[in-house]
């Protein structure tokens, strides 16, 4: 059963649960995924999220990378980033690889958690922990994004059975 594998750290089972691992998965090499992630992080927010109103003008925040690196990213834009990534992950016709959409999805959730202590997802701590860890474990994820994801992990309740 897939859920059993996920509970034991099976990254392929987790990928299947999150929609990564279907027909589009595996068609990209790690260096290609790294390049696509760099491109997505350099993409202007207004291209993918549309006009964002006053929040878009807050400081030098023009790209997804700018948003995720800010110490105080607007929660509204993080929610829109999460929703954007989820929509692409769920769309079989999306040109954005599932793996990239999934990392952006967890990065948006992670930024809200790390920077605001806010939950913008209905995922429970266990699923969120596994998703964040899956993204951290991808060899093609850049160190800044990986650091954000690790910081978000630190804001979750301790893993059952792993006390101080």
Image (spheres, rainbow, N blue to C red):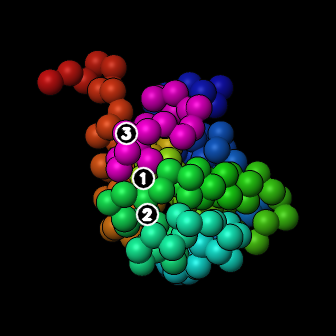
Pick the residue in front: 154 or 160. Answer: 154
Q: Is residue 118 magenta?
A: yes
Q: Residue at x 80, y 57 (%)?
A: 91
Furthest residue in direction right, as rendered:
93
Residue 117 numbered tag:
3
Which residues fall within the magenta stretch? 112-129
Which residue is disc 1 drawn over? 111
From this view, report whether residue 127 is shown above or below residue 57.
above
Q: Is residue 94 left or right of residue 77?
A: right
* 86 to 55, vertically: above or below: above
Residue 23 % position (x, y)? 77, 59
**Of callouts 2 and 3, which one flags the residue occurring earlier in the amino acid sequence?**
2
Dot 1 and dot 2 residues touching (CB under 8 Å): yes
Where disc 3 sits, the SS reads loop
Q: Quadrant of residue 120?
A: top right
Look at the image and tell me whether residue 34 can be seen: no
Which residue appears at 65% of the width and 39% of the height?
17
Image quarter in which the N terminus is found: top right
Q: CA distance from mark 3 to mark 1?
A: 9 Å
Q: CA distance from mark 2 to mark 3?
A: 14 Å
């Amino acid at each position: 059963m897939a859920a059993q594998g996920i509970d034991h750290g099976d990254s392929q089972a987790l990928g299947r649960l999150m929609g990564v691992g279907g027909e589009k998965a595996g068609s990209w090499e790690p260096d290609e995924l790294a390049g696509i992630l760099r491109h997505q992080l350099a993409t202007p927010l207004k291209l993918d999220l549309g006009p964002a109103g006053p929040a878009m003008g807050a400081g030098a925040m023009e790209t997804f990378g700018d948003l995720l690196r800010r110490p105080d990213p607007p929660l509204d834009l993080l929610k829109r980033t999460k929703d954007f990534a989820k929509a692409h992950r769920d769309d079989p016709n999306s040109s954005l690889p599932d793996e990239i959409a999934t990392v952006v999805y967890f990065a948006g959730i992670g930024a809200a958690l790390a920077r605001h202590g806010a939950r913008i997802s209905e995922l429970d701590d266990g699923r969120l922990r596994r998703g964040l860890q899956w993204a951290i474990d991808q060899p093609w994820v850049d160190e800044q994004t990986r650091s954000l994801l690790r910081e978000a992990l630190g804001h979750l309740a301790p893993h059952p059975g792993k006390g101080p």
